Structures are given as structure tokens and as C-alpha cells.
Image (cartoon, helix red, strand yellow):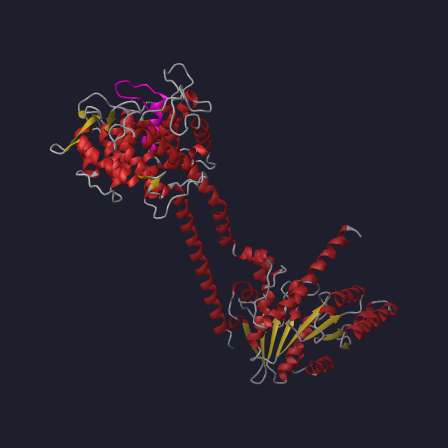
Amino acid sequence: MKTISVHSYKGGTGKTTFLLNLAGLLAQEGKKVLAMDYDLRAPSFQSYFSTNNLVSLSNYLLEDTPISKIIFPCQVNDEIHLDIVFSSMEFLQQHSKQRDKLSRDDSKYLSKLFNLQKLISKTYDYLLIDTIPGFFYRSIDALMVSNIILVVANPSISNILGLEELSGNIYSMLSKETKMVLLINKIEEEGIQADKTIFEENLSKLKKIGDQMFTHTLEVPFFNMLSERIYAFEKDTNKEFLDVITKLSKIIRE
Amino acid sequence: MDSKEKVQNEDLQKIKNYLQNSKKNIERMKIGKKPRRKFKFIIKENKFLFTLVLIIIVTTPLLTIILNRNPLATSPYKDAITNTMETFESNFTAVSGLPVHEVISENTSSELIILSTLANSILIESGLFSKKDNLMKRISFIFEIIVDDSFRDYNNKTQKLPVFNQFLGIYALYQAFYVLEDTAFAFSFTNISRIVNTMITDFLYYSTWPNLFAVSEDTSTSYLVDQALALSVLTTHMFLTGEQKVFGWDLKEITGGMLSRIENRFYISASQSFFHKYDTVTHVSSGISTSADLMFTSLGLSRTEKFSSGYAFPLSSYNLHQKVINELIDSNWLVHEVDKIDDSIQIKDQAFFTMVSYLLNLQNVGLEIENSTSTFLYSEDGFVNSLQNPIVTAESCMYGLITMSSKNWAKIQNEREYAPEPRPTPTGTGTETESPVPSASFSFVGVISAIVVIVALSRMSMKYKTRKKFGDQAEI
């Protein structure tokens, strides 16, 4: 089983969209995939699926709820199976002490994630983990257990500076065997809204970081409908976007 | 660098440290080991257990101190002891514990010093008074004045005390030996053995009638009470030191001979009664035995019954003790001197009979006498000398305290005398004071520790079950 974490410096980079679309594509190809919402600060898997489940990842991390109770199947049709682990914002809002526990530098949660990974390793081909953006202990946990890390960044100054910080302080300290992939997203959107010269400079800087610090760099063109959808499951699909995801899936399989 | 940047750097460093530790933890988990967690999180998760352990750690020494130093709550005579000690402290002592006020016509004497040492030591051993240091200071200060090769008169150091006080003094020295932490030579077993040797040499062997102690070196009169106390002290000396011989004297032989002489010269077998005294020159036995004669004889017999002295006395210590109860103790458990209707009710007899009863393991009798003493011979200020002359003196206070302390103390003394191993060698160094109270605190700690262990095991068991369950259900 391969474990892939999607990380970024800031929120709103399209991290979750990439993750779930990648998960959908892999599932469509017949792979057994588990997508886990480990973005405990701002979970968003609920936006992609209609669910009212009450048991979330926090229950496993904090209350020893069995793994089987937190995994929910998302059956698109008879052939495509995608399993999901949700996180609940409501749970953390209602249990402030529990939320505090999850934000500590306690290796207990790394251990729980490691055990989860170990227990499901024979059941799934891929475990995809959506992480908390930025410097957080739980993000570190996810990065530590991953074989591949997808980092999503926009060509803005703050993203560039953040990526430099992350690369210098975190990514450089990870295992050499970890495959690092940089996804430069919303290029055209930034290109329209920002000053053209500055945009080009930023894009160049991002690519430079990608060349220096990452195994692969993918440039993703702007899509009007990069909304909360999994295109692989839709009849009227976004072919251009799926092409990017397909490239990504190839890198992952290498 | 401004403060915000500083905080950010610190936070970043924490993240980096966590990452480094996580790498190590991953390696540990890969080989089946548990990750290393910060101790503060383990404490937070096991707050209950850690709090309990903390409470035990903090309270154990406190409880030991409390239980050792102020266990008066367990004594029904708490007020009597406290008030008596207050009276004693304010009227009779600066440092010495001897009378300092003119209002009480009591002179400093060796007898009073011996009694003070005995009472204070017993009180410490009983654990019924918290100001142990005060008592020990008093014992140390006053006793060496009167001890040489034997006990001397306080006012005339060339004069030896009568034989009864000599042996009572030796008995007080034993008790002081066990309570003083830094034992001076006067309180050492070496010195005690020296005094025992002097007693045998000066009062027994050279007396005109061997195997009986004369009241003093220059007289021919032997009293039963002297023989009885001597029997008790000499046997006790054997038990405590583990030595049968003192300076060449065989204590078994001496006590066996004494028993024979007591039977021949003091005992009337037909009535199972005793004479009060015997003249070693005229060979005449006379006088009716007093309560003191009989209770000390009972004590002496009880000690000799613990080993084979080579001589069997026709009356057992228990039967003699019963005889005292039947003939000299009234329905109020007051000890009379010669019969149940005489007017002589003295705190001294109450004290010694309580002590003897507890040493004979007759707890019920001891309790009755203790109770009657506090009822009839205790005033608000302290214990009185006698019913007929109810004044509070240093002496009466000390006898009262002996009465109240005997129950706890006798248990310790009896355990010592039954010790299978020889007692501390006569080096002059003290041993730690034994008290029944530490064992109580030890039991308490034991119970609490047991609870902690049970709780810890049950929690571990629960965690194990959860893990097992978790593992089973994790098969998807």
C-alpha cells in the first residue's frame, strides 16, 4: 500500500480537490483507495459527499473507536469503490479539550496513524491523506508516514515564502526515499488577477523551488469549474483537469 | 528580532524537534516498539493514578509523623495525659522535670529521678505524647547524676540506694536505652551490666543469707518485694542482652536459687500466701504481704516461667495475679495495700498493677485498672497521690502516666523479651525506638499501595482489552 499526503502552506490551494479527484481516478481504475480527511482544523470532505455520519477520525484518535467504525464506503457504481474517513468540525467544536489534545506535540497520534496504516495495509492499494496546511504537529504525523507527498502551491508571494519555509525546515528533513511532488495550481487565475510581471516572477520562483526541492513539478492550468466535485465520477467530465490528474497518477505509480 | 519573530522561531524549532523525534519513533514502531512520549502527556492521561501516588508520597511521612507524634485521638485518656503533662511541665520542670515550686513539698531525690526516667521512657515508647524531644532531654539530663557503679543518693553520693530502687533504676535504664537516640554511657548495656554486677556482689552474694537480696548492704532484712523485682529485672536482663552470664555471674543459677529461697522463707503453701519480710540473722519471716509484694512476685514469676531456671515455683504467676485481684482489688478496680477494705488506695499501686497486668498479657485487667485510675485518681490538673491524700505531685503525675502508657509499652517490652536473637550488644549505642504506632501507619500505607496497584492493573487490563477489541475490529 502506498500512502500519499497532500500538503500546502496555506489553505484554499485546491489541496482537497486534487486529493479526492486523484482518489476517484485511482478508484475508477479499480484500485482499492481510502481517502482520509486529516485536516482536523478545517475538514471539508463533507462538501464532496452527502453524509450525516457521526463517527469521525477524531473518535479513533481520541476515544479508541475501532477503525472499522470510522470508514465509510462511497459506492459510485458496482465497479468503483472509494472508502472515506471523515473528520468532524462539529465534534471538535463541541469538545474543546479534545481539540486541544490533538494540537499537542504528543507522539501518541503518530502512533495511532502508524497503527491505522499498518492495519489497513493489506486491504487497500492507496491511502490518501488530506493534511492541515502549514506547520502543525498532525501534519508532520501525516508526512512522516507517507511515501509520496503532494504539495500544492499558488504563484503568490505568500505561497512562495511559505513553500521556502516548509522546504527548508520540514521537507528537507524527511526521508530521502519520500517522493515529493509540487503542484503549481491556478496559474492562469493568478495570471489574470496579478500583475503579469510579478506573476511571471513568482511562477519562475516556484518552478525553481520545484526543481531544487521536489522530485516532480506539475503545472496545473486554470479551470473555471474547479469546484467541489470528483470529475472521474461524472459523465460530463472535465477532461483537461482529468489529464492533469492522470499525469499525477502516473507519477505516483512510478 | 522582535518578540513575534522570536515566538515564531521557537514554535518552528518545536516543530522541527517533533519531526526529529517522530523519525526516531517511526523507526521504533517499525521494529514493534512503542513510540517515546513526553512524560507530561502520560501524566495528563493518568491524572488519577499520579494524583493518588502523589498523595501517598506526600502523606506517608506526614501520616507517620502524625500517627507517631500525636496519636492521642486513639487514647480514651487523651485529656488526662495532656493535662497531666501540662501540669508537669509548668509546675515541676525547667529542664530536669523535678519539682521547682514551693507549693508542693517534694524534694528532689534519686527515687524521683528514677521514676521520672521510667515514666518518660514508657510514655515515649507508648507513643501517647507528641513532645518526644522534651522527654528525651529530660531523661538524658537528670539520670547521669545518680548513676555510678550503682544508684546513689541524690543528696549524698556516697550512699547507695536501697535494693528496690536499684532494680527499679536498672529497669528504667533499659527503657531509656531504647528511647534515647544517642545513648550516653550511663544508659548503655555495658553500664547496666556493671550495675547488675554490683547488685549481685554487694546485695546478694555478700549478704548474710545468700540468694536473697538484702534491703541494703548494712541490714539483715530482706523484703519480698525486693526479691520479686530483682527476679524480674535479672531475667529481663537475660532476655534483652541474650547473655546468661554477667561478669561471671550465672543469672539462671541465681534466679533459680532465689525462687527456692522465696519459697522457703516467704511462701506459706497451706494458704498460698506470703510473708512480707525475712530477717537473715534471726531467720524469722514476718508481716503480711502487701499488694506490691504480690504483684511484683507475680511479675517475677511470669518472667522466670519463660525459661527453665531449674526450679519450679509451686504457684504460677497467673494464679498469683488472680489472688491479688480476688483479695486486694475492690469492685471499682482499686488496688488496696493489704485487704479490700483498707483505706490505702495509692496511685503507685495502681500504676504498677496496670503495668504488671499488661506485661502478663492480661489486657482486660489492665484496662479496668487504667479506667478506675483515671476515674478515681485523676483531677483536672493531673493524677493524685492517693484517695486519702489527693494532692498532685511530680511523683503522682508520673505514676499516672505509667498507668496510661502501660498498654502500648508492655506490648513492645514483651516482644523484646521474646526476641529469638540476642538484643543489641552492649556497645553503648542506642537503637531505634519501637512503637506500636508505626506499624499502624505502615498498614495504612500498605492498604493504599494495594489499592493503587489494583487500580493500575485494572486500567492496564482495560487498555489491553480495548486494544484487543480494536485489533479484531480493524480487520476490514
Query: What residue do we see at 35% from left, 20% from top?
Result: B393
Compared with A110, B332 (above or below) is above
* The magenta segment: B383-404
Quadrant assignment, res A133? bottom right
Q: Nearer the viewer, residue B32 or A138?
A: B32
Magenta span has A143?
no
Image coords of residue A202 (percent x, y): 83, 69
Front-most of residues B327 and B460: B327
Among all residues in the image, which is located at the extreme right? A197
Task: Tell me if residue A170 comes above or below residue B407 in the rendering.
Answer: below
Tell me where residue B420 appears, x and y as whole percent: 34, 48
Q: Position of residue B176 (x, y in %)?
A: 40, 34
Where residue B307 appears, as percent x and y from the top left, is 26, 44
Rendered view: B10 above or below A142? above
- Tell me if I can see residue A196 in this picture: yes
Q: On the rendered structure, is B100 left or right of B307?
A: right
- Number of numbered discs visible in the structure rendering: 0
Q: Which residue does the image show at 24% across and 27% down from the upper left?
A: B223
In percent of the image, x 32 and y 18: which residue is there? B391
Residue B385 on the magenta segment: yes
Q: Is residue A22 above or below residue A197?
A: below
Q: Residue furthest left?
A: B270
In the picture as drawn, the residue positioned furthest to the top comes out as: B102
Q: Looking at the rendering, which quadrant does residue B451 occupy?
A: bottom left
| Residue B382 visible here | no
**Residue closest to the eye, B2 or A13:** B2
Can you tell which quarter of the image residue B148 is in? top left
